[in-house]
Image (spheres, grey):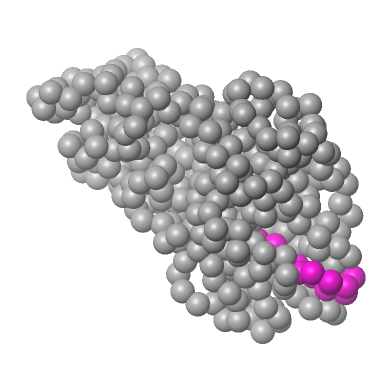
Amino acid sequence: MSLRQDCEFIVQEAIRHVLPGEAVKRALTGKSFSSGRLLLVAAGKAAWSMAHASYEVLGARIDGGIVITKYGHSGGAIGNLTICEAGHPVPDENSFRATERALAMTAHLTAEDTVLFLLSGGGSALFESPAVAPQELQHITAQLLGCGADIVEINTLRKRLSRVKGGRFARHCAPAGVETIVLSDIVGDPLDMIASGPACPDSSTCADAMRIAGKYGLALSEEARSCLQTETPKFLGNVNTVITGSVRELCRGAAAACAARGYEPTLLTDCLTCQAREAGRFLAAVAKTHHGGKKRAFIAGGETVVHVTGRGKGGRNQELALAAAEGIAGLADVAVFSVGSDGTDGPTDAAGGYVDGSTAAVLAAQNVSIDAVLRNNDAYHALALTDGLLITGATGTNVNDVSVVLIG
């Protein structure tokens, strides 16, 4: 088996390990609900898979609902549920329209009613009712995504610019109970930050929001500034929450797959949150230290960030992989790869990227400078030249990213 074949097997098995269907079914099997209506609201990149699993368990007990997911992530009709696709990572008009439908559906509920709220990563963009002008919200979101802000910083601001985030959706549903099942896409599983916490009390403060806005030099309207200084709900008595999956499970799945291929797996961390380029260079350094001995695999899970300075095409996982290429140049038995568990990396059709000891030489022979490519944030096109794009298609799950060093 080649390193590339091992990579594809490990990616496939790691993602299979965190598909939400069985976990959602376990969370719902045997669960009882109040005597009133049961409405389903699913939001996020894994919304369709989670809703499909829920419908298989509950069937006709569900009185209606809506599923809001990213373009291309729907798998078709599900019973009596409305399926909507919308924009990500920046919300679009379809995000706003679908969320308004969800709000209308869950208005005027009673204490006997229940909302089954299925939440996964991507919900911050897909489930949105702006508290400021939609164009300003989109502009602020795009600025934060491009300036290297981490997801907790981004979602701290998103909460206060929204009518559904920071616990406001659960408050809207009251007095009905809200049974929330969460697929975590944030390191450490902070419930109030996953999809910006529509059904969770907020742990951040107005001071936090203003500090972040100042840190990144955001130009805010008076309306937006006022929103950032408005507190979000700190207590919600109508919510029960279960987490069904996280990056830890993704790393465990990757480790098991590595072992099945004869590698001795080592988990470096499941809390990787640095710049993508720095993570790639670090993993290359790990490879250089340990190559030449037995077959080993080093695994890191989390979510890196990219500071966008160019106009190229790529994503954090592709940039991480390409940044490792120079460090492992000439090492015939070493590969580094990184993938997003949802199957999409940035605004591309790739899940991530793969490099090995030959990548740098192949690019150099085509007069491609890795440093120049990284400055232009154009990892996609460079990796395409080396057959280094990892393409899985939409996976139906979303629990951060996994990066792996293979030493053959």
Q: Quadrant of the N terminus?
A: top left
Q: Vertically, is 354 above or below 50?
A: above
Please name the predominant secondary structure of the magenta segment in the image. Answer: loop
x and y percentages locating residue 90 in the rendered image: 52, 46
Q: Position of residue 329 (x, y in %)?
A: 22, 20
**Image position of 255 (left or right of 204):** left
Q: Quadrant of residue 324?
A: top left
Looking at the rendering, in which quadrant would you find the C terminus? top left
Q: Identify the residue shown where x is 72% and y is 65%.
A: 103
Task: Kindly identify the residue that appears in the image at 67 percent across and 84 percent down.
Answer: 60
Residue range corresponding to the magenta coloring: 106-118
> Which residue ends up furthest to the bottom in the rendered image?
60
Magenta residue check for 107: yes
Q: Nearer the viewer, residue 62 or 263?
A: 62
* Residue 58 in magenta stretch: no
Q: Is residue 251 visible?
A: no
Would you say 84 lies left or right of 11 here? right
Closest to the observer, 119 or 211: 211
